[in-house]
Amino acid sequence: MSSRSSRSPKLQGLISLLLCFLAAQARERPPNINPNRHPAASLKPDIFKCLKPTQKPEGKQSIHHLLCFISTRTMQLDPFLAATVAACLLLHLLLLRLSRKSSSSRLPLPPGPRGVPILGALLVVGPDAHRGLARLAHHYGPIMYLKMGTSGCVVASNAAAARAFLKTHDAQFANRPDVVSARDITYNRQNMVFADNGPKWKLLRKLCSLHLLGGKALADWAPVRRAEFTHMVRSMHRAAAEGRPVVLPEVMVCALANIVGQTVVSKRVFDAQGDESNQYKDMIVELLTGGGLFNIGDFVPAIAWLDLQGIQAKMRKVHRRFDAMVTKLLEEHEATKDERKGRPDFVDTIMANRQGEGGETITDTNVKAIIFDLFTAGTDTSAVIVEWAVAEMLKNPVILRRLQEEIDSVVGRGRLVQESDLPKLPYLHAVCKEALRLHPSTPLSLPHFSFDDCEVDGYHVPGNTRLLINIWAIGRDPKVWDAPEVFDPERFVGGRTAKIDPQGNDFELIPFGAGRRICAGKLMGMVFVQYMLGLLVHSFDWKLPEGEELNMDERFGLVLPKAVPIKAFVTPRLAPQAYI
Ligand code: HEM
């Protein structure tokens, strides 16, 4: 296997380090700027604030701010420092040019924006990266190459491009980039989600599939899902009786975390939805939001230690809390192992199967890291889809009524939906697929990585390049989807797109990814989404608080939830005994 680094990125990293050191030095000095002297003087001292998630500057504006910032600051440096900055910049540009020329391939790189020195195209992409990259793809095409800091990044934005990378070159791109943000939260990549394509990843994936996420294991754990989702409906029924609104993502995440907790460590992690489960939800949301932000340190590794956006510090803090929770869970698990004789949970099973065929061993750290994977990847992802589906139906009550009628006709009004009803509910499937298309939970999938050079669709893709699949843009491609911005489940009922399936074979719709790194929990995810949505719309009518408008903004991160969670009053629509 090739090495992750090459000389040119190292040198460029060094130069970036120098530049950023100088910038940091300048930051240390008091601004001391006469506001009347320079147009850039009105800038806030810390321009890197423009990259924080809550603010949404336009890409061009950000570049302008950055250049003004550098020029303002450079003017405050002494002449020697200013000359060094200029020399570094020149050297950086020269290296960029040389690295393009020195490639052994005669093929061109895929097209893409050039960006600015050091940061490359980072600022061009903007804070909502899925939308920014989709905009760029309109201009540059479905396969783009962007220099992001010192790292190369290739982006696939339509079905054919995704197929080229995830089918034709699947093995080559089946690694993950070694990014500092992931390292901090995944016990130094000892988990499955961020492991490279190697024996450890294969062993972890096999164990998860056999004992938790595959078809048979999924069927074995059905009673746990039924108990927890019934519990969720009852708690909503109580809220209705007491005239309290329901915060939808909170009740769902509480149920999902309890399902994961019971199957993984035989523990309902939250007795009831309340402060503790809300804190857990916040923790997951912080991890998933922070994990998806474009962290400058991930793209210019030499300056990662500066943590310019403050992302790493925040992630480390949340990770410490998460680790404390997992450590406590594992201590309790060990203390109660005699109580589980004959009915092992997932952790019992992997502890008993630590040894892989090729001599690989699952360590205690791997166990913690895989628990981290299952709680993070297994809870918010499904809740996000269901929340968007409910939001779209609140906007369009005709769809909601049609879905309720379908479920009434199969289940009646005397009991709750059960998993065994799901195959008989085609319109429910259509609504779920439409939510997965329009609001995929991980808009840019998880990043992939290739160590070696390769040729894709007539382009040269250099080694040490990361791959982003713009799942969000693929689901809105107007060449495939009629009126792509409209939530219309009908497109999965009849017509030319009806048969498109989201489970990884049809590249026009890949909310779970595709190829060998496809979501390990896609079967479970589909069941979670269909079962929860079926229960929620069949059991209740929905109403927003008086005078409140539905906010449809999204918040970008590794997952793409609604920026403002749904808070609604629910009214029971089934016979009273159904809720007992
Ligand atoms: C609707 C729900 C879900 C969606 C949309 C979803 C989506 C995804 C996506 C897009 C990926 C990245 C694929 C790639 O790298 O190409 C992924 C990976 C993964 N997902 Fe899911 N997921 C969902 C539910 C779940 C559940 C319920 C679990 C487990 C409890 C899970 C566990 C994982 C794991 C372990 C990976 C990493 C696989 C690997 O790197 O080999 N996911 N998921």
Image (spheres, rainbow, N blue to C red):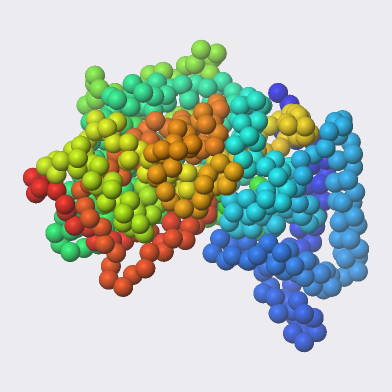
Q: Which quarter of the figure has residue 224?
A: top left
The total number of labels drawn is 0
Choose top left, top right, bottom left or bottom right for residue 392. Answer: bottom left
Split into 4 quadrants, where in the image is the N terminus? top right
Q: Which image quadrant: the C terminus?
A: top left
Residue drawn 37% across the image and 50% down it: 389
Does 175 appear above or below 381?
above
Residue most toward the front?
A: 495
Q: Where does the image place residue 171, in percent across and percent down from the top left?
A: 63, 24
**Can you see residue 420?**
yes
Q: Position of residue 502 (x, y in %)?
A: 46, 35
- Measured as percent of width and height from the top left, residue 335 is found at 28, 31
Who is closer to the viewer here, 244 or 186?
244
Would residue 295 be visible to someone looking at this image?
no
Q: Quadrant of residue 461?
A: top right
Q: Is residue 221 left or right of residue 93?
A: left
The residue sitting at the bottom extreme is 36
Horizontally, residue 221 falls left or right of residue 68, namely left
**Residue found at x 44% / y 60%:** 552
Q: Residue furthest top?
A: 357
Residue in the picture at 54% in, 14% down = 359
Q: In this view of the protein, which residue sits in the foreground, 156 or 122?
A: 156
Relative to 151, is 237 above or below?
Answer: below
Residue occupying image coordinates x 80% and y 84%: 37
Q: Nearer the viewer, residue 298 or 430?
A: 430
Residue 260 location (% of width, % of height): 34, 37
**Which one is nearer the viewer's eye here, 406 or 328?**
406
- Image-based side of 344 in relation to 554, left or right: left
